[in-house]
Each structure stands twice: as C-alpha cells, then as structure tokens.
Image (cartoon, rainbow, N blue to C red):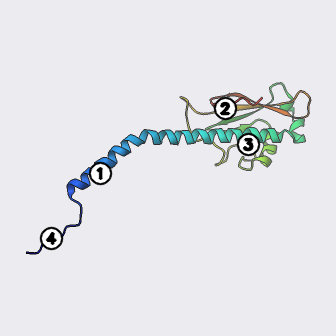
Amino acid sequence: MKKMNNKGFSLVELIVVVLIMAIIAVALAPQVMKWVENSRKSNDIENYNALVGAANVAGTDENVLKDATVKSAAGATITFAPGGTSINSAALAAAMKKTLPDLNADGSQSNKIKVESSWDGGNTSFEINVKLASDGTGIVVSKVAGKFPVKNFS
C-alpha cells in the first residue's frame, strides 16, 4: 500500500497560528494608536514652529514693519486651528507666504499647513502674537494661547 505524504497544515495548526496572531494584534493595538497620536502631535508642533519661523523672517520685510496692526499695542495675531489659519495683517501674511510657500496668500491654511489632530481634551489651536520690537528694527513673536507643549517664543 502506498503511503500518503501530506505536506500541508492541519486545521488545528492553522487555528493556533490565527489565535496567536490575534493575541499579538490585540496587545499591540493600543501602542500603535499612541504612535499615531504622537505623530499627529509632532506634525502639529512642526507646523507651529514653521509658522513662528516664517513670522520671524517676515519681520525683516519693510512692509510688515510699516503695518499699523503690527505697530499697535495688540499687534497682529496668527490663529492656527482645525478650522484654518488666519492672519489679521495683510502685510504679514504676504511676507510669510514668501518664506512659507505652503501658506495660502490670504493667510489661510493649505493642505500641508494644517492641524492634524484633536488632543489634550479638545481641538488643537493656538495663537501667535506679532508686535513691533521696542527698538523698531524688527518684530517680536510670542505664543498667546494654545495647548502646544513647546516653549514660549518671546
């Protein structure tokens, strides 16, 4: 009688492998979700830093230094939120557009400059205040409000 040479897996072996994979997936799911959230936070902070840097560079533009909203006590405000980025100074928005091409000409957010996530118990948003420096040679950029765990730029 010819002996059968079975080279496949039995049903029990396949079920055991599937169960092991399911256990590993359940154990790793929370960690993967943390990684995803951390990457979103990192992206938000990167976008924040890009806007702060662009505002600092824009401060060398003569049109920005002449802008009344920057010279006023309140200064110009850049708001960065899930609803969009807004800059209440046309001169500042135009100067930042030169430094940061991903920013729309009107100061609104592009697809690249946006808030990716909602974290710390609410919608991520912040404001950056831009004022004329006391010596009149540049601008001072400072964080007004927000939930970003980054240093204050003042």
* Residue shown at 66% from the left, 41% from the top: 46
Q: Residues within 10 Å of mark 2 (few under 14, many from 20)?
A: few
Q: Which of 115 and 23 is in front in this view?
A: 23
Q: What element carries label 4?
A: loop
Q: Mark 4 points at which residue?
A: 4
Instruction: Give the Cα separation between the discs numbered 1 and 4.
Output: 27 Å
Label 3 vs label 2, nearer the camera: 2
Indicate left or right for 6 with 144 as reference: left
Residue 85: image location, x then y, percent: 68, 39
Residue 150's label in the rendered image is: 2
Instruction: Give the Cα separation between the discs numbered 3 and 2.
Output: 23 Å
Residue 122: image location, x then y, percent: 55, 30
Label 2 vs label 4, nearer the camera: 4
Label 3 vs label 4, nearer the camera: 4
Sooner in the amino-acid sequence: mark 1 or mark 2: 1
Indicate left or right for 54 with 5 as reference: right
Residue 71: image location, x then y, percent: 87, 30
Residue 107's label in the rendered image is: 3
Kindly indicate whether the residue at mark 4 contacts the one at mark 1 (C-beta within 8 angstroms): no
Q: Nearer the viewer, residue 134 or 90?
A: 134
* Residue shown at 80% from the left, 37% from the top: 89
Q: How crowded is mark 4: few (under 14 residues within 10 Å), some or many (20 or more)?
A: few
Instruction: Give the Cα separation between the discs numbered 1 and 3.
Output: 52 Å
User: What type is the residue that disc 3 sits on?
Assistant: Gly
Q: Mark 1 points at which residue?
A: 18
